[in-house]
Structure formats: C-alpha cells, structure tokens
Image (cartoon, rainbow, N blue to C red):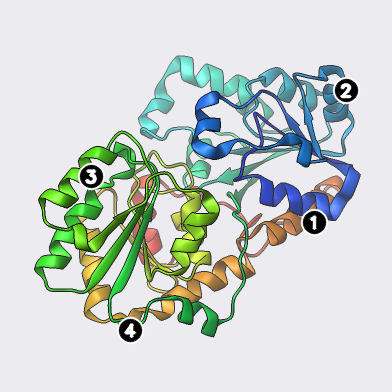
Amino acid sequence: MTFTFVSNYINHHQIPLCEALYQELGEDYTFIQTMPMEKERVAMGWGVDLNKLPYVQCLYEAEYDCLKKIAESDVVLLGWTGREDIAASRLATGKTTLRVSERLYREGQWKAVSPRGLAAKYGEHIKYRKRNVCMLCAGAYTASDFHLIGAYPGKMFKWGYFTPLRTYNEEQLTSMKPQDGALHIVWAGRFIPLKHPEYVVRLAKTLRDRGYDFYIHMLGDGEMEPAIRHDVESLGLSQHFQLYGYTAPEQVRDVMEKCHIHLFTSNYLEGWGAVVNEGMNSGCVEVVNAQVGAAPYLIRHGVNGLVYPKDQYEKMEELVLELFADWQKFQKMGYAAYETIRDTWNAEHAAKELLRFSESLLHGEIASAKTGPLSVAEPVRPGKMYRAMTEGTI
C-alpha cells in the first residue's frame, strides 16, 4: 500500500506519527509539505531540518511530481494544505481518501448559519459526503461541527496529535517525583489570553493562604509573561514559582517528569492541546478544561485525570484543592494517565490502526477501532460534553 500525507508543513507534533508510518511502510510512505513554515513558527522552535526526513517532499519545489504522487497513491490523508484544489483533484479520482481536521467552529456553532460560510463548507466538505472519504477528527468537538453541516455521515473517527512516547515502569515514575512533601505543579504553554496563565497565579495565592506546601513550574513565553512575573513577585509568591521562559519540547518533558500535577487551563480555542499527551505520558495527574479538544478523548474523569467545565476557575481550583487535601487517594491517577498514552494514544499504535483502517477501506469496508484512534467519533454537542465526560458516556 502506498500512503501519502499532505499538509501545509511538517512540525514536531506530526513527526512521531510520520516516523511510525515510515517505519511501517518505508518508501511507500510520503509526507508532502505544501508551503514553507512561517518565520513566526520557526522562531517558536517549530522549525524542522527537512534534509533529515527522507519521507518529506515539498510541493513548492517539485509540484508535478508531488501532484502525481497524490493522484496515484492508494491512500491519501489530507490535512490543511492551503490548496483546496489538491483535495478536489484527489477526490475526483475516486480513490480512498482521508481528511483530518480540528473543529470548524471554535468560536461557537452559531457561525454555521452563515450563508457564505455554508457555501464554502459545501465546496470543501459537504458535497463529498457520499464519496470514498472519511474524516479523522483531531479533537472531540470536531465531529459535532461536521455533523451540524451534514458532512461525512457515519464516517467520522477519533484522531489527534501524538507526542514522542517515553516509557517507564510504575516504580520509575514514582521515584522521579519529589518526595519532600511538596506537590509540584507544571503549566506549559504560551502566555496568551486563551491559555489563562493568570489562573495559575490566582491558584498559587489560594494554596499559599491555605498553608499548603507546593511549587509551580511555568514554562513558556508570550505577551502576558511580564504581567505574570510581576504578579508572582507583588503577591509574595516567588518562593513557590519558577518561570522558565521559552523551553524546548524535550526540556518541557524533563520538567513534567518531576511534577505531580499538570494544569492545562486553555479555553475553547485550543483545538487539541498536545501538552495534555505529554503530561499524561509523564505520569502527572491532569486537571484540564473540558473545552480543550484532547480532553474528552484522552481523559476519563476521576480515573486517569480530572476535568472542569468551560472557563470556570472556581471549579478548577476546587479540583486542585481536593488533590492537596487527599493526595494519597488521587495520585494513582497519574499512572493511569501514563498507561493511556503508553497503550493507546501514541504514534506507534495510531500508525498501525491507521494502516489497518486504510486496508479495510481499500477492500470496501469500514473497520473502526473499538477504542482510541480510529474508533467512532460521536457528535456530542459542545454544551453537553462536560456532562458526558463526568457521567462516563463518552
């Protein structure tokens, strides 16, 4: 089977999956990059040396060869390419095609009523509803958005991003966490409004005022960083904080391994949130906003992590205080989180499932997985997702 993945550019979130697919298929796997990465992304550390990736070809350097490969491959996976003509040309061949997308209406499904928007979605997605194409939903809110516009009926499946897998046994994970009585909390991301770094400072003040022993590691930079540093100092919280500034992904993982709790406070604008994968892989107890795309797929509330609704700071604080009040009761969630990534939500497993699923499509069948990547993506309305998670119905 020849398999081609087409997207705007390759980055550190896609490389683990691409490496796993290349390991399985060798020269029969190709990643086609349709445009150079923006300078802003390169400055953020997303840049990749394409010469070290033998499976990457660039459309803007060899368009004829790349378009020929897209047309002739047995299976093509289409991400966002900036070139809808590529999708149209591939689908015209009638060959097996997969599409992957984050949610359409991050700011609210009310946008689906826009006539101009619906016309665009018809041309990109709705008119292909009966074609030989399936949608891989990179986030738990994606299926509801596409269901709302009538696209890909019965052909939407769970997907996501897959970070590099680190493996440990339970004793190793436990020994990496500090045993001095303090609970270490990690928050990693850009210091921008949608990620709510100010929640961490507010939480720290509450923990300090309650007399808890804690230390907070904040990794990242951005427009809100100076204000966060000022607030930490002005509130007398400096002894409880380390602010690292921009930190490379591998170093973020090193810090996570030494922390007990991972806070992820992004709002509904966070399509997936790969640091959730990383925190779980590091054996952290997750406390995550249920609006984050990764949360409903990765976290079983009360089993391998905890979720809170919308942007409700008070609910997030309540969960953290419960952890501090009875840490012995909750700490096993960290290893359960690790097992979720080790056993199911990792690049190697996802690649094998993707190829198995693709083979079934080539034989005229749709063989979804029972759980994890390529299992059926149910279209749960955003307003009902938190309840579904806390009741264990998703």
The answer to whether residue 249 of the structure is visible from this angle is yes
Residue nearer the viewer, 17 or 187: 187
Viewer-nearest of discs 2 and 1: 2
Lateral position of residue 200 relative to residue 162, left or right: left
Q: Which residue is mark 2?
A: 65
Query: At x 46% / y 48%, what residue is drawn?
Result: 247
CA separation, marks 2 and 1? 27 Å
Circle 1: element type: helix
Q: Residues within 10 Å of mark 1 (few under 14, many from 20)?
A: some
- As drawn, the label of residue 329 is 4
Determine whether label 4 and label 1 are within 8 Å by CB. Answer: no
Disc 3 from disc 2: Cα separation: 50 Å
State which mark lies toward you, 3 or 2: 3
Quickly name the residue at label 3.
228
Mark 1 highlights which residue? 356
Query: Foreground: 34 or 183?
Result: 183
In which quadrant of the rendered view does residue 320 lie? bottom left
Three-letter code, disc 2: Asp
Q: Are marks 2 and 1 in contact (CB under 8 Å)?
A: no
Dot 2: within a 10 Å radius of its alpha carbon, few (fewer than 14), some, or many (20 or more) residues?
A: few
Q: Secondary structure at mark 2?
A: helix
